[in-house]
Amino acid sequence: PADLLSAVLKRSEIIMEDFEKKLGLLAKHRKRRELFAQMSGCLKSLGALGCKQEHLERMEALISEMKNIG
């Protein structure tokens, strides 16, 4: 169980880093729709790993804001 928890936490860290990288690319990247889809996939993965709902909702709100800006 401790190993499993550690693995889940590590995986969620990796997903978060990936999410942040994609956010950084978003401003410059031409394939914006594809990036939004990938970021939504990151959110689903985090949800499956048991990430706190308020964190997921905050990230979803950020994605929506960025879609509206661009």
Image (spheres, grey):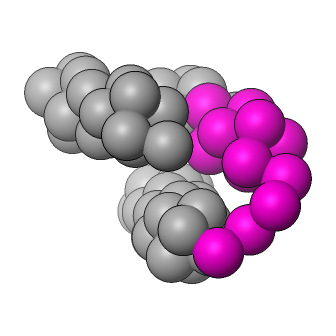
Give the percent coordinates (x, y) of residue 64: 38, 26
Question: What span is colored magenta in the figure?
Answer: 28-40
Residue at the spot 81% in from the left edge and 61% down from the top edge: 30
**Residue 9 appears in the picture as rendered:** yes
Give the percent coordinates (x, y) of residue 40: 62, 32
Give the percent coordinates (x, y) of residue 39: 62, 44
Q: In which quarter of the image is residue 59?
A: top left
Q: How many labels does the image show?
A: 0
Main secondary structure type of the part rendered in magenta: helix
50, above or below 14, in the image: above
Quick check: is 36 in the magenta stretch?
yes
Quick check: is 70 in the magenta stretch?
no
**Residue 52 appears in the picture as rendered:** no
8, above or below 52, in the image: below
Residue at the spot 59% in from the left edge and 63% down from the top edge: 26
Residue at the spot 74% in from the left edge and 68% down from the top edge: 29
69, above or below 2, in the image: above
Work out whether residue 63 or residue 5 is closer to the camera in this orientation and state it: 63
Q: Quadrant of residue 15?
A: bottom right
Residue at the spot 31% in from the left edge and 33% down from the top edge: 65
Work out whether residue 38 or residue 67 is closer to the camera in this orientation and state it: 67
Judged left or right of residue 52, residue 32 is right
Judged left or right of residue 54, residue 4 is right
